[in-house]
Image: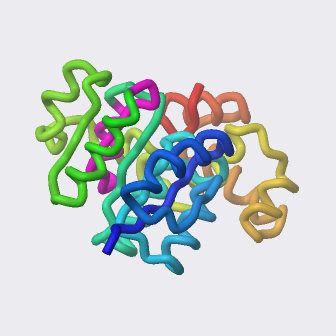
Amino acid sequence: MRKSVLLADDHALMLEGLSRLLSDEYEVVGSASNGHALLEKAEHLKPDVVVLDVGMPELNGIETARRLNRAMPWVKIVFITQQLDPAYLRAAFHAGASAYVAKQSASTELIFAIRLALENRYYVTPHAGGEAANYTRFNSAINPSELFGGALTPRQREVLQMVAEGRTTKEISAALGISPKTVEYHRNCLMDQLGVRTTAELTRYAVARGIVSA
């Protein structure tokens, strides 16, 4: 029986390409364009492998992987991304990833990485440079909680990401299913907790911690 794969990327062409690439060897059971949709589909479809990007709207790939790993620890998580900064790489493995592949890699690299993940082994793209040789020592590296929002709650990280993406209070309210007043409450708490005064400073904080891409 073929192993099942669920895909997540916010670019439709990327999803189509990945589906064509993997369908010969795996059963591609679905796709999602953001982290929230991926978590919902994973709960329903119970895939063996999830292939996702780091940068996705509404809920970034790292936070999605963290939640997925907590809810379904048997699912193998494979990142395919343009983000090769060591901070993203370390955070991905702390969040539960089995493999980290660069989008500029050859297609055979992704297939190889998935095979290793299903064998309970790990893979890091050579495009990551020296980090590829050091990935087994992540426990002594940067704490991912410091990279992705410190002691912030999951809801605070969601609001922070959307604020940094330029979403309005009304848009955040609709996306998260909370009232505009609750959005403002979380925004004010974030500012107090992080010691910032403006949306621009919140955005700079989010970029510096890898919550959104620059």
Image quarter hosting the N terminus: bottom left
Q: Is residue 88 left or right of residue 114?
A: right
User: Residue at (68%, 45%) from the top-left corner?
Assistant: 12
User: Residue at (49%, 71%) from the top-left corner?
Assistant: 42
Place of residue 176 in the rendered image (x, y in percent of width and height, measured from the top left): 72, 65
Q: Which residue lies furthest to the right in this view?
A: 170
Q: Establish if 140 lies above or below 47.
A: above
User: Residue at (70%, 51%) from the top-left corner?
Assistant: 187
> Which one is in front, 19 or 136?
19
Q: Which residue lies furthest to the front in this view?
A: 24
Please say whether residue 93 is one of the residues in the magenta stretch: yes
Q: Is residue 202 visible?
A: yes
Q: Is residue 193 left or right of residue 138?
A: right
Image quarter hosting the C terminus: top right
Q: Give the range drawn in magenta.
A: 87-105
Q: Which colouring convention does the figure follow?
A: rainbow
Q: Establish if 47 lies above or below 10.
A: below
Place of residue 112 in the rendered image (x, y in percent of width and height, measured from the top left): 26, 43
Please say whether residue 96 is one of the residues in the magenta stretch: yes
Q: Residue furthest top?
A: 129
> Which one is in front, 88 or 184?
88
User: Residue at (61%, 63%) from the top-left corner?
Assistant: 36
Place of residue 211 in the rendered image (x, y in percent of width and height, measured from the top left): 53, 40
Q: Is residue 73 left or right of residue 80?
A: left
